[in-house]
Image: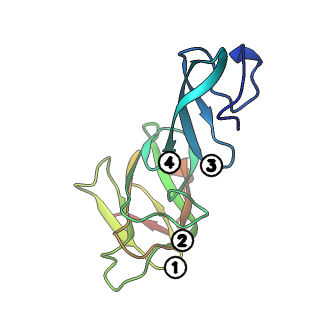
Amino acid sequence: MCLDCDCVHPAGCGSGWVGGSGHKSNVSVPGGGGRVAGLTGKVAEAQKTLFVLVFPTAKECGGVLTEQQKVIQSPGFPDEYQDEQICYWHIRVRLGQRIRLNFLEFDVEDDTACLADYLEVYDSYDDVSGFAGRFCGDYLPDDMISTGNVMTLKFLSDASVTAGGFQLQYTAVNASLLSHNHTHHFT
């Protein structure tokens, strides 16, 4: 990436150039996972970068999900998640459908009561009602199926130990097509 290069026309600049006289621009940092905000101006008749700020890009953490199927993973997966994360995923599918959670990988800091780092599942659209379970450690939880068309996942990590994280997939299914084998149904 060129941080101190001559470039007369920003359109002709190579990738990674922050160009244009007095123009602010965002460009990707190759291999850095961040963004660069730069301000350029005339310095001795050549365009030079005068000021550069680098901001880390936040890893995906939570959101409102309405797709019929999606993979959800801890921030940074397959790398270890970071300390002090709180992520909420609110899942909503069509009326008349249920949500099947299928855990693909699971490695969250283990402790006896899952008080440090954990993934909680709620059979509701918030984390106030419908508590279905709290998971930590490296035991792969059984599949779960919601009682309605909404579900909430909450991931929390404390300020100390981290682990590999998790990956799961949710799928919208019609209630009449559900199999009762190897699946935890909420009651």
User: In the rendered structure, are the residues bearing label 4 and label 2 in contact, judged by CB atoms less than 8 Å apart?
Assistant: no
Badge 3 or badge 1: first in the primary sequence? 3
Badge 4 or badge 1: first in the primary sequence? 4
Does dot 1 land on a helix, a strand or a loop?
Answer: loop
* Residue beneath disc 3: 32
* Mark number, residue 106: 2
Outermost residue toward the bottom in this view: 112
Q: State the CA–CA distance, disc 3 to disc 2.
A: 27 Å
Q: Position of residue 22 (x, y in %)?
A: 53, 15
* Residue beneath disc 4: 60
Rendering quarter of residue 121 = bottom left
Q: State the CA–CA distance, disc 3 to disc 1.
A: 30 Å
User: In the rendered structure, are the residues bearing label 2 and label 1 in contact, judged by CB atoms less than 8 Å apart?
Assistant: yes
Q: State the CA–CA distance, disc 2 to disc 1.
A: 5 Å
Instruction: Name the quarter where the C terminus is drawn.
Output: bottom left
* Mark number, residue 102: none
* Residue beneath disc 1: 138
